Image (cartoon, rainbow, N blue to C red):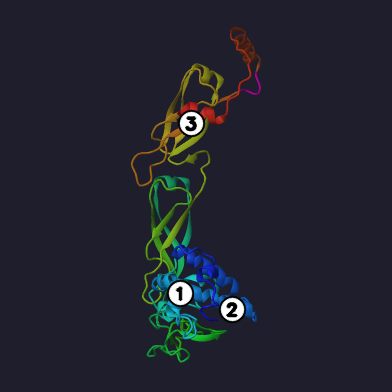
Amino acid sequence: MSAQTKRDYYEVLGVERSCTEQELKSAYRKLAMQYHPDRNPGDSVAEEKFKEASEAYSVLASPDKRQRYDRFGHAGVNGGGFGAGGSGFEEVIFQDFGDLFGDLFGGMFSGAGGGRRRNRAQRGDDLRVDLKLEFEEAVFGTEREVRFRRHEACDTCNGSGAQPGKSKVTCTTCGGQGQVRMQRSFLSIAQTCPSCRGAGTVITDPCKTCRGEGYQLREKVLSVTIPEGVEDGTQIRHTGQGQPGANGGPAGDLYVVLDVKEHSFFEREGKDLYCGVQVSFPQASLGAEITIPTLYGDHVLKVPEGTQSGTSLRVKGKGVPILRGHGKGDLIVEVRVQTPAKLNKRQRELLQELAALTSIENKPQRKSLFTKVKDIFG
């Protein structure tokens, strides 16, 4: 296609002349995925559109070429990219392909550095272990042991994967490059070497103990310090206790995830504890001092005279210690006035006498639980 008959590169990609680099890349990515030969086998029209879009992008993606194209049009970049004197894709566009097509075509466009990147140090995977705790253990903290399994270097080959006295040899398939090139339509595409999986070396005499893996799965026991005030779902990280890294990379981490059991009557909201306690009608009417259990021992709670059912009383400092902080939350006690289900003759007489001396207007009221809580804690 001559320079006179070529379409405008901005028109090919469907972008404005003032487009940003990211807008340019996004437009090309969309077209390349739509018309790529691997997605349209045998479709010559799609192949031509892919070539056209790739040529446009190869010019506009280069700031220098884009400037020349904006000034002189196709004549300013004649001979580059896919022109009559061109040599096909340039290296810069292959580098961009790694970003543009990474999620669609994997490592096909990773370029010459793909094999080397594979041999770089890589951090090991993280591990997780769940640990069940009693409610009190989460409140006050404790020391526990956890058991988990992770890979460690093989004792026989010291992690090399080869038999003692042997070593890895250069892969003959890729010549140690970690990649092989394949011809796809008009493209020469680099792919990870299937023999060495990108490592560039292979093991000819694998270790019999680990079968060439270099690692063995072992059970580990780790002492875990549980700080006071942790909650259900809290994660405690132990750095470097995860799976070993590759090519000298650091090990991953171990995350201990806490599963806290519920208490028989205390409920927890952050640093505060909640419970309910029953009192008799006379206790609520006349006031009383009652003994209630807390996580710190028994506590004498004063019920004020005239306390209504549903009233919440706060006991300072009887809640949960603040995690990695100072102080404790509170214990919130909801007073529940118990109405006797059966009355003996004397009780009935006394209540009838009381009813005659007291009266209230039985007027309907509407008050949500949320409003009550606001009234109490304000």
Mark 3, other Cα within 10 Å: few <14 / some 14–19 / many ≥20: many
Q: Earlier in the sequence, mark 1 or mark 3?
A: 1
- Cα gap from disc 2 to disc 3, whole angstroms: 77 Å
Q: Which one is in front, 87 or 75?
A: 75
Q: Earlier in the sequence, mark 1 or mark 2?
A: 2
Q: Residue at x 39, y 32 (%)?
A: 316
Which range is magenta?
339-343
Looking at the rendered structure, the kind of residue marked 1 is Val
Q: Quadrant of residue 327?
A: top left
Q: Is residue 344 above or below residue 322?
A: above
On the question of residue 318 being in view, the answer is yes
Q: On the image, numbered disc 3 is attached to which residue?
A: 333
Looking at the rendered image, the disc whose residue lies closer to the viewer, 1 or 3, is 1
User: Viewer-proximal residue, 334 or 180?
Assistant: 180
Q: Nearer the viewer, mark 2 or mark 3?
A: 2
Amino acid under label 3?
Answer: Val
* Residue 338, position as x, y percentages in the image: 58, 25
Q: Which residue is mark 1?
A: 59
What is the count of numbered marks? 3
Q: CA distance from mark 1 to mark 2?
A: 17 Å
Residue 10 position (above or below residue 229) = below
Residue to which mark 2 is pinned: 48
Q: Secondary structure at mark 3?
A: strand
Query: What residue do we see at 41% from left, 64% from top?
Result: 253
Q: Position of residue 39 (x, y in %)?
A: 61, 76
